[in-house]
Amino acid sequence: MTGAAIFGFPESAAGAARLADELGVPAREVLVHRFPDGESLVRVEPPARVAVLYRSLDHPNEKLVELLLAASALKDNGARRVILVAPYLAYMRQDMAFHAGEAVSQRVVGSLLSAHFDAVLAIDPHLHRIASLSEIMPGVETACVSAAPALSAALDWSANPLLVGPDEEARQWVEAIAAPLEFDVLVGRKRRDADRRVELDISGVEQAAGRRIVLVDDVISSGETMIAAARLLFDAGASEVEALATHCLAREDDLTRMRAAGICSIRSTDTVPGPTASVPIAQLVAGEIRRRGWLRKR
Ligand code: R5P
């Protein structure tokens, strides 16, 4: 049996292959058959002693069940350790019941994954009220990898950009990217009344006049946060606004609306495949897996 291998699903096979390349181990495919009634049959072959399942959990409702089936098949076929690399880990935003009667999705999904995986790695998971994934995945080795070094390397610093985080939650990324180079940053304050109704203010926004702006956030979902920020910045006289994010979940029509708002470039890491995914994260993930010795025999 192979020592270690990276297993990708059909839509994550390319990312899995890039990670396998970085780690110098084979890449394998998880075969998925979908029955006419919507059930999935999952097959993994050949097995490995340490199996890394690579799948981002955008569209999580469709993907989660197949992921758990694959983890179980790998264990049944002799894997001693099954590791999940979920570059985008969903359901992290609902980390408390904001209104009476709501499920705390983060806790539910955390305990589901901890029952099937020995270790879990995610890139910039949206952790707001907890410090580490271990708090929702007891007994599991967890790693949160920051995409900041990859995002920072993707910027053209020679153009002297002003970095803007649209809300307080984005502060950690915008500061991590700008701090080593001592670049200017602004951070906004956001109020969201509904999925697509966002209000922002950015104190110090007048500093945007005549500047090239890079908006930095962990997630672009509907794109409304970026659009509201771009409006404020253009009103303040910004000469150019681009958007850079760890994860881009936006649909094509939302990207079109962002472009129509004047955002000239939208880029993200390749945690979620799509037209904006131009910043590779395989090296960062491989570095973390190596550092933690996750592929070594135990
Ligand atoms: C939430 O606080 C996140 O950091 C993002 O700002 C948010 O998910 C973006 O969502 P949308 O693109 O729908 O405005």
Image: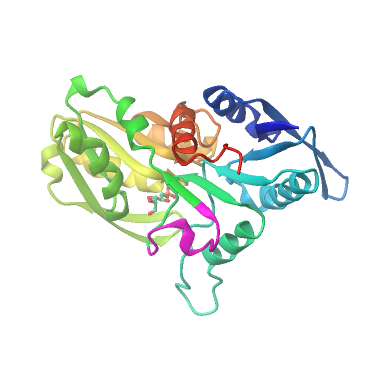
Quadrant of the rendered structure where residue 238 is?
A: top left
Q: Position of residue 220 (x, y in %)?
A: 43, 43
From this viewpoint, is residue 108 visible? yes
Q: Position of residue 71 (x, y in %)?
A: 71, 48
Please identify the dominant SS of the magenta region: loop
| Front in this rendered view, residue 239 or 31 | 31
Q: Residue at x 16, y 25 (%)?
A: 160
Q: Split into 4 quadrants, where in the image is the C terminus?
A: top right
Give left or right: position of 103 versus 179: right
Q: Residue at x 18, y 44 (%)?
A: 186
Extreme right residue here? 36
Q: Residue at x 66, y 39 (%)?
A: 51
Which region is colored magenta? 129-141
The answer to whether residue 95 is magenta is no
| Front in this rendered view, residue 152 or 237 | 152
Give left or right: position of 9 versus 138: right
The answer to whether residue 137 is magenta is yes
